[in-house]
Amino acid sequence: MKYWFLRLCLACIPLGASAQWNYPSYDALKGQIQSISSNKLVEQVSIGKSFSGEQIPVLKIQSSKEAKPTLLIVAGVDGKHLAGSINALSVAKHILALPAAELQTLLSDKSIWIVPVLNVDAYKRNAQTLDWASGNGRQIDNDRDGRIDENPNVDLNKDGVISQMRVKLPAGPFRSHAEHPDLMVVADRTKSESGSYELFKEGLDTDQDGLFGEDGLGGVNIDRNFTFEYPFFEQETGDYAASEPETRAIIDLIFEHPQIATVLHFGLQNNLSVPEQFDPRKASERITKSWTSNDTQISAIISQLYNKDMKSLGDAPKMPAGRGNFSSTVYYHTGKFSFVTPSWWIPSQADTSKKAPPNQGLKDEDRFANWVRAKQIQGAILPWTKIDHPDFPGQEVEVGGVVDKFRQNPPVEHLEESGRLHADFIVKLTKAMAKLEFSAPKVTNLGDEVYRIEIRLFNTGAMPVYPEIADRIKHVSKMKSILEIQKSQKFLSGKRLQLYPTLAAGGSTNFSWLVKGKGKVQLTVGCPSAGEKTIDITL
């Protein structure tokens, strides 16, 4: 009874984008970015331009321009994920609102950089039009029929959104949900369920290829255009890997700034709630497709930290990485720790219906419907309305059901808690990054102005200096030690410059030299992703 009352109320509300779709326009988003950059601890620069010529901003939260180990946060890679961009800006605001002493300590040896929206073209379009697509501003032939944008989205019932379209059949694959009549689910034949509908995206088959609205505005999905396992000849992937200026801009940023140690992506995958797993077979292949054993241990530690901080949000969904995605490329091809989370997900809601079983282990559709009902999310699931459809003459066709963008992008006010919790997690993640400390040096006079120098370096952070996989990638800056001596001194053993593999969390390494000649020497040890430590030693 309550549901039918709610359905009646929703029917009386102007539906569509204006119902409860309150994401800021891109101009408003730029205003928020500019406001954040007015803080004295923030520098705003551009890392490049989108396909349509829009600047791609990065907010550098740092105490100085000195290169320090950096956590890079990237959002808005897949154009359908506007919530990630809003949460990225929320994180920036929460971090800058920390007590001055805490913020000063955090930034004393670390920096946090935020790219709030990489796919600017998609945000600009999706925030204010019907064309809800992942891709940038490039025109592409999605269905590869030699024509471009010939089958765009069509708002058949003029309600301001693109929703679903169902066609009545004697025996179709879909049926109405028992408790949520406007929600369509697949009929389970193993349970003797029968369906009576086919389900499509709202639209017309303009090019008569059997598909609806499959080739409209929206070009290359940046989160499918990266180099790791790039998916050739698939929709929205581009002509070749890294074909798009947005893709190259973010990878160039990482390559050109070796101090970037860890990358956190607010995107439509998740390796934080469930950590990466070591696969010996994939790890031993010529092209490695598994995190290394040691790196998965770090993934498990960070995942445990993340799940503890996100406990109030409920169980996060399993969202495996797709091919050609940003986060996998960061780990496998740039040698950085790479974590990804949607930063918001539909929380568990108790179903108060007397007919419903205990609400444990719900399917995605049930979880979505219960959330819409409990929070009274206007415009997320629409009542079905009959239309005359030229592609189905004489058949019963209705438009309504789920408005897809609400699945990953709730009304903005529902992001407040997740933004705050992720800011707290990011502070902890930044503190967990590698930190180098020297022991007191030991100098032994061996006679005849010959001195043995011994010193130990510790990594006091909860993460290694860099991922183990980085030692397989030739362009990653390795750990190094440089001992500078005076002209009157000379090495008897040991070298001025030596390279080393990564230093594990809580690990240490010993250095020693034999130097002839009195005076001072200067030792510098480290690498960009962990910072460098320098100490003067008197012989």
Image (cartoon, rainbow, N blue to C red):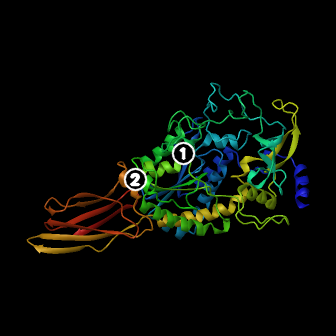
* Label 1, residues with CA under 10 Å away: few <14, some 14-19, many ≥20: some
Kindly identify the amino acid type of the residue bearing the numbered disc 1.
Answer: Arg
SS of the residue at dot 2? loop
Mark closer to the observer (1, 2): 2
Q: Is residue 351 left or right of residue 486?
A: right
The residue at 74%/56% (across/down) is: 368
Quadrant where the C terminus is found in the figure = bottom left
Q: State the image coordinates of residue 523 (x, y, percent, origin top left).
A: 27, 64
In the picture of the structure, the residue carrying the numbered disc 2 is 284
Task: Identify the residue at image location x=69%, y=35%.
Answer: 214
Q: Residue at x 67, y 65 (%)?
A: 313
**Could you tell whether 30 is left or right of 1 in the image?**
left
Q: Whole-Å distance between the Cαs marked 1 and 2?
A: 20 Å
Q: What residue do we see at 24% from left, 69% from top?
A: 537
The label shown at residue 501 is none
Q: Is residue 107 visible?
A: no
Q: Observer-nearest residue: 169 or 179?
A: 169
Label 2 sits on what residue type? Ser
Task: Pick the residue in front: 498 or 446.
Answer: 498
Vertical position of residue 471 compared to residue 427: above or below:
above
145 or 512, which lies in front?
145
Residue 142: image x %, image y %?
63, 33
On the question of residue 318 being in view, the answer is yes
Q: Which residue is mark 1?
A: 323
Is residue 33 rendered to the left or right of residue 405? left
Count every numbered label the image shows and give the total: 2
Q: Say above or below: 305 vs 370.
A: below
Is residue 66 placed above or below 399 in the rendered structure? below
Q: Position of residue 472 (x, y in %)?
A: 36, 52
